[in-house]
Image (tube, rainbow, N blue to C red):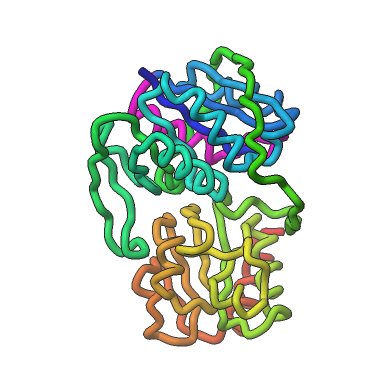
Amino acid sequence: MASLVLAEHDNAMLKDATHKAVTAAAAISTPVHVLVAGENCEAVAQAAAKIAGVEKALHADAPSLARQLAEPMEALILSLAGAYDAILAPATTTGKNILPRVAASLDTPQVSEILKVVSPDTFEHPIYAGNAIETVQAPAGKIIATVRTAAFGAAAEGGGATLEKITAPADPGLSKFIGEALSKSERPELTSARIVISGGRGLGSAENFKLLDSVADKLHAAVGASRAAVDAGYVPNDYQVGQTGKVVAPDLYIAVGISGAIQHLAGMKDSRKIVAINKDADAPIFQVADYGLVGDLFKSLPELDEELAKRGYK
């Protein structure tokens, strides 16, 4: 039949994670349709229709869908599920919140965080905090899966899909949005940045964590952190990279003062190039690093910043 991809968006902009989920979906079952559910999100639906390989963009617009709460989203997806072989979503907070409910309602096991589509019913995904990759075969029937987007390339632009408006089911009224507190940054989004520089407990304080800012600005990089740095209160939770944080796979990952606990490595070890700065020569981070510098970060980081300035980075 077809694959349905749940679009990741904020009602104003389509997230890159959607393009990557489309790539995974196309390897499972075609044609691929994208579901854009939200409120006043016409522009997002139009953007989804332009993804190469997408045949149809479904646009559901209702106040109950504004925050993509799990219950109204479940009702919407279930109303469409009969027409699809596979239903996928990026393995983001939103996707992880919604798809398990859908899978339970359909009495279908979910395959979580797929890294590779081996065949339309067989997938690779990580287990044991990413220390092992398991190959699993889904049972006959509908495929429900979340996609670890760091493992897939983004589908290109230039498509010309049909845009179809659909009616959302009535709000089940089981939950309501109260509020949110978001940190604002002019830097790239952590999960889609080409360069990420992350700090760990070795930085010692929230004030010292700011040493990363100058280098990040020169490289146009996103700033991340280990769980130890987040738990110590140096930075907010949304900086966290790792098994219980965000999974990233940039072209360049710079780890500063991060020892390299298994949980952190699970969130960044697929980066194309990894650079580590740590004073402990036996730190586990050096086992996955392409380039390692054993030294005092409080000396090495300013030297790196100075060298970048000399080379014209601003």
In magenta stretch: residue 20 = yes
Query: Image quadrant for the C terminus?
Result: bottom right
Q: Is residue 280 above or below residue 179?
A: below
Q: Is residue 95 above or below residue 7?
A: below
Q: Is residue 109 left or right of residue 257?
A: left
Q: Residue at x 28, y 31 (%)?
A: 120
Closer to us: 217 or 52 = 52
Coordinates of residue 92 in the picture (x, y in percent)? 53, 48
Q: Please give left or right for residue 208 compared with residue 109 in the image.
A: right
Relative image position of residue 205 (x, y in whole percent): 67, 83
User: Is residue 310 among the parts visible in the rendering?
Assistant: no
- 127 lies left or right of 243: left
Q: Position of residue 14 (x, y in %)?
A: 63, 34
Q: Residue at x 24, y 36 (%)?
A: 139
> What residue is at 61 percent from the left and 81 percent from the top?
203
Q: Is residue 33 above or below residue 102?
A: above
213 left or right of 257 in image: right
222 magenta-colored: no
Pick the quarter of the image with the N terminus.
top left
Give the residues drawn in magenta, as a range. Answer: 10-30
Residue under the image location 56 percent in, 56 percent down: 195
Q: Position of residue 299 (x, y in %)?
A: 61, 84
